[in-house]
Amino acid sequence: MRIVSLALMLSAVLGGALPAQEEKKERHVVLISIDGLRPEFYLGDGFDAPTLKAMAKEGASAKAVESVYPSVTYAGHASIVTGVRPWRHGVVANTKFGENGGTQEWFWETKDLKAKTVWQLAHDAGRKTAITAWPSSVGAQVDWLVPERWAVFKGETTEGLLGKHSTPGLLAEMALAIGVPKGENLKSKEVMDEFISSGAAYVLRKYKPHLLLVHLIQVDEAQHNFGRDAPEVHAAVKATDANVAKIRKGAELAGILDRTDFVIVGDHGFADAGEALAPNTLLASAGLLDADGTKVKSWKALGHAHGGSMAVYAKDADSAKMAREVLEKGATADGKRLYSILDRRQLDDLGYNSAAALALEAEDGFMFASTSKGSLTGHKPWSKGQHGHLPTKPKLATGFIASGPGIRRVLIERMRVIDVAPTVAAMLGLEMKEVEGAKLDIIE
């Protein structure tokens, strides 16, 4: 006891080494994903985003952030929180691939992730953790959870699913404090972002978690519906900027703003989309799959569309070889290249889904139709903006901002989404091991 007391006395005399360690544990990080975030939203004068621009100016920001392949929401977000690419974390797309092709079942659940997340690392280290919407967060072991889950199957309601999978009592608590949208309102991405950001601010005010994750989605929706630079996209960016300001205000009202670092990250950029391609019709003509309308009956080779790219699965090596030959013949039309083919060696270098035999990469101005929207029946464009392409394409670059008392002022030329998790862990005084990403040199 005397030795311990002496150590404590020395600590106090020499500047409080032990209390300083305790203070480090009390730092807070808020990780906000803006789906479809592009660097030009906060760099330059093209968009009305005063909060994001101020945060970028006072802290660290990136000119370009490389996503993963395919550059889609759920694969990207899984890499953001695990620090590894799809071949390691297992979330290889937005939706799962089944015996009859692409399904409506998204990678909703944390158990779908095969790699450890930064929220699991923080929780295991005794930090208070919270999520107000994040991909693959159903069942997440955090202290306060409102996961991302919406209705896709008959008989489901988004309201019921959120109630079922959120921390018991938390939605009711939020309903009293900030209100919770219901019914048709839950289909509006603008309404959902208002709710999610208000919920994040509320959780910060009341519970002061050490790590909070938030996913905002209306910017992605606007770019899909109207293209990269439509007025609706500018409006969505402005509204999202206000929602970020609201979350920061929550930290201020909680009295923890001076101990909170904010990380704003995107999952992918955006390309304008034109004609939707349907390579599965080529496979069907070659006898490699049998379909009835949009229903797959049987197949030896079958594509699963991811917007600007498509994974092609094959039952065996002979089917894979035949599929490649057929798809190569159909890769041009009227002398114009429609897509390129990536082989397994290239996909391995990209950390791509190991179950796919090959992948198709759409040329500029093209996308791939999903099974339910023309993949088996012909060309049916469904959006004006798209992603899913190779993450090295300039327009597919996403963004990154880090701002707060623990962050240095620096402009990063290029980084990767897999660098986010080890960097967020370091902000909390923790270390993520066995990751493919690297900790960024932005921490004071």
Image (cartoon, rainbow, N blue to C red):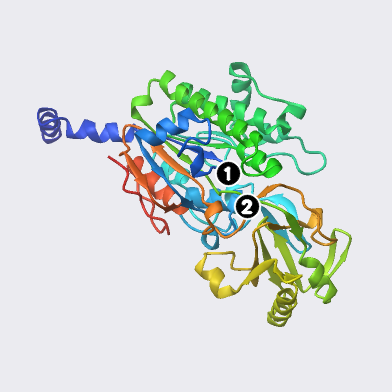
| Residue 300 at x, y percent in the picture | 77, 74
Q: CA distance from mark 2 to mark 1?
A: 9 Å
Task: Classify residue 188 by image quadrant.
Answer: top right
Q: Secondary structure at mark 2?
A: loop
Residue occupying image coordinates x 40% and y 59%? 434
- Tell me whether circle 2 and circle 1 mark residues in contact (CB < 8 Å): yes
Q: Which mark is residue 175?
A: none
Task: Give the quarter of the figure containing the N terminus.
Answer: top left
The secondary element bearing badge 1 is classed as: loop
Residue type at tag 1 = Gly
- Judge whether residue 175 can be spotted in this image: yes
Tell me where residue 387 appears, x and y as whole percent. 62, 52
Residue 210 appears anywhere in the view:
no
x, y percent for residue 105: 72, 50
Residue 394 in the figure: left or right of residue 375: left
Q: Quadrant of residue 122?
A: top left
Closer to the camera, 285 or 198? 285
Question: Looking at the picture, does residue 83 appear above or below residue 152?
Answer: below
Label 2 amino acid? His
Q: Name the side, left or right, on which 440 lies relative to 334.
A: left
Near mark 1 (Cα within 10 A), the count class, few <14, some 14-19 or many ≥20, is: many
In primary-sequence order, the first of circles 2 and 1 is: 1
The x and y percentages for residue 70 are: 60, 58
Q: Is residue 418 left or right of residue 391?
A: left
> How packed is label 2: few (under 14 Cα within 10 Å), some, or many (20 or more)?
many
> What residue is shown at x 43% (from left), y 26% (from top)?
208
In the picture as drawn, the residue positioned furthest to the top comes out as 176
Identified at 83% across, 71% down, the residue is 284
Q: Residue furthest bottom?
A: 318
Q: Which residue is mark 1?
A: 36
The image shows residue 139, relative to residue 277, as above or below, that is above
Dot 2 corresponds to which residue? 387
